[in-house]
Image (cartoon, helix red, strand yellow):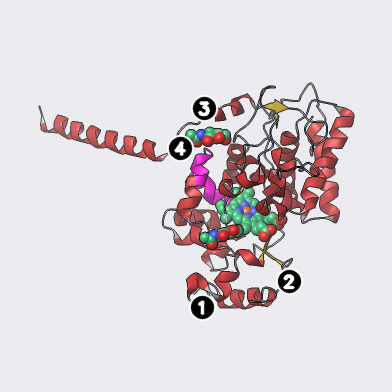
Amino acid sequence: MSPSTSMLLILFFFITIITTTCSSLSAPVNTSLVHHRYLTVDYYAKTCPQLDQIVGFVTSQTFKYSPATAPATIRLFFHDCFVQGCDGSILISSKPGGKQLAEKESEDNKEIPTGAYDVIEKAKAMVERKCPGVVSCADILALAARDFIHLTGGPYYPVKKGRWDGKQTPMASLVYSNVPHANSTIDDLLKLFLSKGLTLNDLVVLSGAHSIGFAHCKHFVNRLYNFQGTNKPDPDMDPRHLKSLKMSCPRYGGNIGVVVPFDATTPFAFDNAYYQNLQGKLGLLATDKALFSDPRTKPLVQTLAKDKNKFFQDFSSAMERLGNVGVKRGKKHGEIRRVCNMHL
Ligand code: HEM
Ligand SMILES: *[C@@H]1O[C@H](CO)[C@@H](O)[C@H](O)[C@H]1NC(C)=O
Ligand SMILES: *[C@@H]1O[C@H](CO)[C@@H](O)[C@H](O)[C@H]1NC(C)=O
């Protein structure tokens, strides 16, 4: 064997090791997550050609008098997809007097402003008038989220459709373990995202949704007064930012309804300032900050902070992947509801 051949063999050996290690780190293919292959942009081209227009009309009207509905609806879509898939199950109200609380009534989802549910219900009612019985609530939610991203200055991307609404409503207690929390670690978040077929990059890119919207004080108040039990603020925070957050969120006796914008510089614009703020120690949640302090996610934060076009492109394709999670199809698991807050 010539020296160069043995070099090649060694090289080949290493490449094999590297690729097998890498693939075992990536998400396993979840066979229950394959129905998204049936999603297409023109799914309703024959049955409801006016769909995008109708939803677009309702979202833009709503945005005029209630701009806070934009971030609320984006979060609604995210939480719908992470709990039992993008199947509109988050929209179902608990049965009055029923024993079990629905997904919607969980602690995490109760924070989502009701305007988000209303805009979906309104769009659905209008869609039903034009094309009764064909368009799922899950698809309307995906479209509305896209519209609101665009209305706030973000990218406009085509939405693939064909999701069926879930026949089952998950219990409220199922929500906690399926959505991220402000006190999650990057490892927790990565594990959660991988379990949904999403990647570490998707985690960083989709967190860019925090370019708009608001958070209640309880999610970050520890950072202001008692960071990791030190009885001191998080040292990793811009002092002026810290001061202003303390004014909105006192240590004791604050109003639990108070919310603070995620993006301290451009709170109403969907842009890449979120990532620039992370570099400037202006992040709000511990998880936002962690994206810049963790060596695995920092490089992408830096790239996105510099390149708004890349952020918009990456965000659009990450939203498509988010919209693929746990998609349902067929009468065994799915239905096409008449109204979004009740099963057929
Ligand atoms: C990755 C880790 C994430 C964590 C820990 C997290 C956590 C949170 C928390 C605690 C809030 C505040 C809720 C409140 O107080 O009312 C919030 C709001 C929000 N989240 Fe996230 N989130 C994450 C990822 C995402 C993703 C992937 C999206 C969408 C693609 C998203 C979209 C939003 C939006 C738009 C809001 C603002 C809601 C509003 O203003 O009503 N988040 N998030
Ligand atoms: C993390 O935050 C949630 C609320 O979002 C809370 O219920 C939970 O107890 C917190 N966990 C820890 C370990 O502090
Ligand atoms: C696959 O996805 C389904 C539905 O989202 C979930 O219930 C199941 O636990 C997942 N399985 C694996 C191995 O991740």
Q: Residue at x 72, y 53 (%)?
A: 110
- Quadrant hosting ligand 1: bottom right
Residue 198 magenta: yes
Magenta part of the chain: 192-209
Closer to the camera in the image, 255 or 27: 255
Ligand 3 within 8 Å of disc 3? The answer is yes
Dot 2: within a 10 Å radius of its alpha carbon, few (fewer than 14), some, or many (20 or more) residues?
A: few
> Mark 2 sits on what residue?
255
The residue positioned 78% from the left and 46% from the top of the image is 117
Residue 77 position within the rendered picture, expressed as x and y whole percent measured from the top left: 68, 44
**What is the spatial separation of the Cα atoms under label 2 and label 1, in whole angstroms?**
21 Å
Q: Quadrant of the N terminus?
A: top left
In the rendered structure, find residue 231 and report the number of the disc placed on it. Answer: 1
Q: Secondary structure at mark 1?
A: loop
Q: Residues within 10 Å of mark 4 (few under 14, many from 20)?
A: some
Frontmost residue, 74 versus 40:
74
Which residue carries the number 3 mark? Answer: 31
**Mark 2 → mark 3, Cα distance in angstroms:** 46 Å
First along the sequence among labels 3 and 1: 3
Residue type beneath disc 3: Thr
Helix, strand or loop for disc 3: helix
User: Residue at label 4?
Assistant: 27
